[in-house]
Amino acid sequence: MKNIRIGIIGGTGGIGKWFARFFLNEGFKVQISGRKTGPDLPTLTRECPIVIVSVPIKATCQVIEQVGPLMPAESLLMDLTSLKEEPVKAMLRSSCCEVIGLHPLFGPEIKALTGHNVVICPARTKKWLPRIKAVFKKSRARIIETTPERHDEWMAQVQVLNHLNTITMGLALKRSGFDLKELYPVSTPAFDAKMELLKKIFGPNAGLYTQIITHNPHSDRVFKDYQQSLSELKKMIIRRNSEGLQKKIEKTKLFVSV
């Protein structure tokens, strides 16, 4: 696999830039195609037997539709998007090459792959799948192989519900009228940890999190469950029913302790 040229579309920032460094360190040759830098798509697909799409969710399928027809049959097309069902369908539909969906479950702030999760969704593969898995295994990543459909169901809970909860807290804090400068001197470690999450979600990469929530096909179900849970809690709190709330928590404790 070493000395193979990998083309990354959108590799100028974020996770694309991280993987460019990763593959370079693994001995690959890497070409990056950004909005204003690098080769055009015909050149990239001609020179690189592996092409990875790493662009925002809302632009992923559009870019795939452009690059897919340019890929030779013996090459490999992959994406790094947080959603897998639609991008994988787009790759299969627009190309005749091998197709693998990837989702690295971490951000560009990590130093190494060791111990981190990478979801692999093989879609149309012959020679490339074992080679790609070998690269990640060598770096001691935890590889989870599944279908694009199951991946998106998982991410509805792992990402959509998680980020929805954080965003709701941020909006509620703003609505409360409190100045955070007033709250920080009396904060708890748990509150401080939540605030670090809020800073991340409400920071420069807010678009990433909003696209994860709004584009996941299972978000409606997640929101329904979330809304129903809030409604149940509201009734118990209004009635000052601490015993009922405690029983609710105790019943759930066995579930979350798995």
Image (cartoon, rainbow, N blue to C red):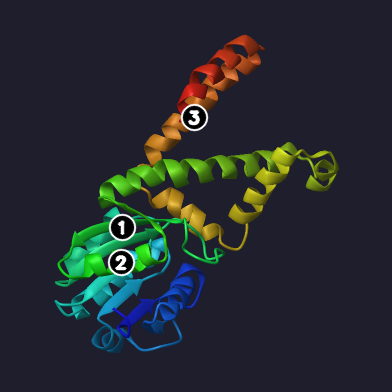
49 in relation to 215, above or below: below
Label 1 to label 3: alpha-carbon separation: 26 Å
The answer to the question of whether label 3 and label 2 lie on touching residues, with beta carbons closer than 8 A, is no
Q: Is residue 194 visible?
A: yes
x, y percent for residue 132: 29, 68
The kind of secondary structure element at disc 3 is: helix
x, y percent for residue 240: 67, 12
Q: Which residue is mark 3?
A: 256
Q: Is residue 198 left or right of residue 131?
A: right
Label 3 to label 2: alpha-carbon separation: 33 Å
Please state which amino acid type lies under the numbered disc 3: Val
Q: Which residue is mark 1?
A: 120
Comes first in the chain, label 3 or label 2: 2
Q: Callout 3: few (<14), some (14-19), or many (20+) C-alpha neighbours within 10 Å?
A: few
Q: Which residue is mark 2?
A: 134
> In which quadrant of the rendered view does residue 190 lie?
top right
Q: Is residue 217 visible?
A: no
Q: Callout 2: few (<14), some (14-19), or many (20+) C-alpha neighbours within 10 Å?
A: few
Please state which amino acid type lies under the numbered disc 2: Ala
Label 1 to label 2: alpha-carbon separation: 12 Å
Q: Of the residues tagged 3 and 2, which is closer to the observer?
A: 2
Comes first in the chain, label 1 or label 2: 1
